[in-house]
Image (cartoon, rainbow, N blue to C red):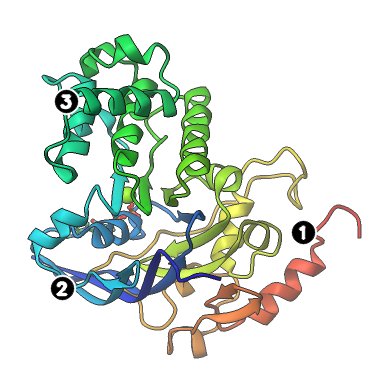
Amino acid sequence: MSAPVLAVDALGVVFETDRGPAVTVDGVSFEVAAGETVGIVGESGSGKSTTSLAVMGLLPRNARVTGSIKLQGEELVGRPDTEMRELRGKQVAMVFQDSLAALNPVVTVGDQLAEAVRVHHPGTRSSVLRGRAIELLELVGIPSPHTRVDRYPHGFSGGMRQRAVIAMAVANEPSLIIADEPTTALDVTVQAQILQVLRTVQDETGTAIMLITHDLGVVAGVADRVLVMYAGGLVEQGSVEQAFYEPSHPYTRGLLASLPRTDRRSRDDRLFQIAGQPPRPTDLPPGCRFGPRCEFFEADPCSVTAPPAAEVGPGHLAACHFVDKVVASSLDAGERGTGD
Ligand SMILES: Nc1ncnc2c1ncn2[C@@H]1O[C@H](COP(=O)(O)OP(=O)(O)O)[C@@H](O)[C@H]1O
Ligand SMILES: [Mg+2]
């Protein structure tokens, strides 16, 4: 396989706060290959956005970043702001949840797209920029792009605005697009359309996509691989099939069990809820952070040492002291298939 577009190694982000250091991302390692879509899932507050902002170099001043983030083989951690600004949009671009905030209300969508291209290609003729803006609107499935290009963002529906934001992100054909909850503000039908747009963009441009969402359903539909975050750490990573059909961390199993499913019923026909709350980043428990909520918990080792990521299959990792027990119990429960 060729070198990954993104290689994150032992990433740590600590925010200095009034209540002390908030350990928000800790020991996170993963890679994203060219043309691949990697989903990052986890409850609100688990550090997903902080991880993506670290990649973009957009963390606030009270953040301390450790570890390594390599984009196309080049280290990003410790880069000066001026260099990160040059990279953003050109090599890595981001799509946020709030498309209204991402667009300038007093500039036409076409002019914003043209500007996004011009920043990295100064001197491009305005007729060329306009042509490119129309082409980009077409790529993201905006009807009548020749007329829509001259409209202002408020003349666009929420779904159309998010398409325009995706068009801005792909304007310079970055090698990586980070989409942070890109469909959360949209209704279900539009959500599906936006995910389809991301897929089209990927087919056309070959860009890698990091798709951040609290919604496992979104990941199942579009991602190749999944990273599961809990309290700042990666608890499991693997292909979509591995994560959904052979979940090997108790947290992943809990997340899956709390999903409404149409294809099979949960063991007792009720939706499962993980008991308790995730810890605060300023007050993490010792050892395994999921320990206090875990059905497999045993004080030693769970409250003593942080579990290392163990390989449970090819490219499939789970960070649990009792991963063998977890895997065995999934098999017992017949959760891998429907009748075998
Ligand atoms: N600038 C900051 N200063 C202090 N704490 C922060 C800051 N930004 C985020 N956090 C904290 O980091 C944690 C993780 O946040 P975030 O990465 O946004 O999670 P997610 O995207 O998974 O919901 C939260 O507890 C949040 O309050
Ligand atoms: Mg977030």
Tag 2 secondary structure: loop
Three-letter code for the amino acid on which mark 2 is drawn: Gly
Nearer to us: label 1 or label 2:
2
Instruction: From the viewer's side, name the closer residue of 65 and 165.
Output: 165
Q: Is residue 242 left or right of residue 228?
A: right
Three-letter code for the amino acid on which mark 1 is drawn: Glu
Q: Is residue 205 above or below residue 56?
A: above
Tag 1 secondary structure: loop
Q: Quadrant of residue 117?
A: top left
- N-terminal-most mark, 1 or 3: 3
Q: Report how far apart the C-alphas of labels 1 and 2 lie in the structure.
A: 45 Å
Q: Which residue is drawn at 19% across and 28% down?
A: 112
Three-letter code for the amino acid on which mark 3 is drawn: Ser
Q: In which quarter of the image is residue 74?
A: bottom left
Dot 1 alpha-carbon crowd within 10 angstroms: few under 14, some 14 to 19, many 20 or more? some
Q: Which mark is residue 335?
A: 1
- N-terminal-most mark, 2 or 3: 2
Nearer to us: label 2 or label 3:
3
> Split into 4 quadrants, where in the image is the N terminus?
bottom right
Dot 3 alpha-carbon crowd within 10 angstroms: few under 14, some 14 to 19, many 20 or more? few
Task: Say if residue 140 shows up in the picture.
Answer: no
Task: Say if residue 153 shows up in the picture.
Answer: yes
Q: In this view, does 63 lie to the left or right of 264?
A: left
The residue beneath circle 2 is: 78
The residue beneath circle 3 is: 126
Q: Which residue is drawn at 35% across and 45% down?
A: 173
Q: Report how far apart the C-alphas of labels 2 and 3 lie in the structure.
A: 36 Å
Q: In this view, does 102 lie above or below 286?
A: above
